[in-house]
Amino acid sequence: MAELSRIVILTGAGVSAESGIDTFRAAGGLWEQHRVEDVATPEGFARDPDLVLGFYDMRRAALEKVKPNAAHRALAHLEREFSGELLLVTQNVDDLHERGGSTDVLHMHGELRRALCASCGVRSEPDGPLIDRPQCPACEAKALRPDVVWFGEMPYQMERIYAALTRADLFVSLGTSGAVYPAAGFVQEAKLAGAETLELNLEPSEGSHLFDESRQGPAGTLVPRWVDEVLSV
Ligand code: OAD
């Protein structure tokens, strides 16, 4: 492996699967248990706010029962030891990268542990269920929604992500099916800008053929091995 100076990593639900968090598109996954239109769109929230708040309250509460796994910890180790630039972008709304030790994580689809005030736009960290309609700490409106990006909304910090992709010499996609844009298009963006591209996933994803290299296996095994390779150059 050539010496690397700028790496962008994109993670998806697969990186948290071995921690016990359901992925979205597997048989029995979250999108088989719940309809996307009901729980992950602004229209669904307008139609039945209690259903939506309850869904995210349940997912936030479930975070207390899980722990980061070897893949999260290996990425945190990479952040500490890599001498070049590293951008860790996640589509995940859990906080397992942070609990695994990463300090700079870009949550492009938002974060379960945060709430967004629909009235004043301030973000906060609620300490109880949103279904109880707590007040916004800034404006006191009882208008908190989960700070997650729903279908039809713009993912966060896209400018920072595209800027890093155009400078990267390696783009790594980890534990994601490549079914949701814009994240699914990052591989082509990086490639156009001249980066090498690597996929680490349990099975070939929809976009596997777009990568220079694709490795299959559980993240908890593949990621520590890959991090060791990067740090040993
Ligand atoms: P998916 O459920 O679509 O895909 C998870 C991927 O992880 C699949 O390709 C699995 O094969 C792989 N996988 C499962 N277990 C793994 C393991 N132990 N190690 C490595 N890979 C494993 O989840 P995402 O791609 O993250 O968006 O989904 C992307 C977005 O779609 C989510 O952020 C969410 C969802 O709708 C929004 O809600 C906006």
Image (cartoon, helix red, strand yellow):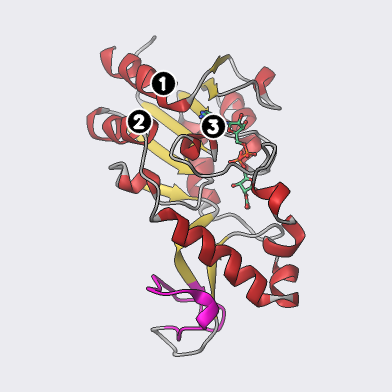
Name the amino acid, label 2.
Ala
In the rendering, at what x and y percent does residue 81 appear? Answer: 23, 29
User: Which quarter shows the C terminus?
Assistant: top left
Mark 2 residue's CB less than 8 Å from ligand 1: no
Q: Which residues are magenta?
A: 116-136
Please name the residue that numbered disc 3 is placed on: 175
Distance of label 2 from label 1 (alpha carbons): 7 Å
In the rendering, at what x and y percent does residue 121 appear? Answer: 51, 76
Residue located at (61% from left, 26% from top): 192
Instruction: Kindly indicate whether the residue at mark 1 contacts the one at mark 2 (C-beta within 8 angstroms).
Output: yes
Single out the mark in the foreground, 3 or 1. 1
> What SS does tag 2 mark?
helix
Marking on residue 34: none
Closer to the N terminus: mark 2 or mark 1? Answer: 2
User: Which quarter shows the N terminus?
Assistant: top left
Mark 3 residue's CB less than 8 Å from ligand 1: yes
Name the amino acid, label 3.
Gly
Q: Residue furthest top?
A: 1
82, above or below 130, in the image: above
In the rendering, at what x and y percent does residue 168 appear? Answer: 46, 29
User: Per the image, is 133 magenta?
Assistant: yes
Say which quarter of the image contains residue 124: bottom left
Please name the residue that numbered disc 1 is placed on: 221
Residue 211 visible in rendering: yes
The majority secondary structure of the magenta stretch comes to loop
Instruction: State how many labels appear.
Output: 3
Using residue 95 as the reference point, say whether residue 33 is left or right of it: right
Please name the residue that numbered disc 2 is placed on: 70
Distance of label 3 from label 1 (alpha carbons): 12 Å
> What SS does tag 1 mark?
helix
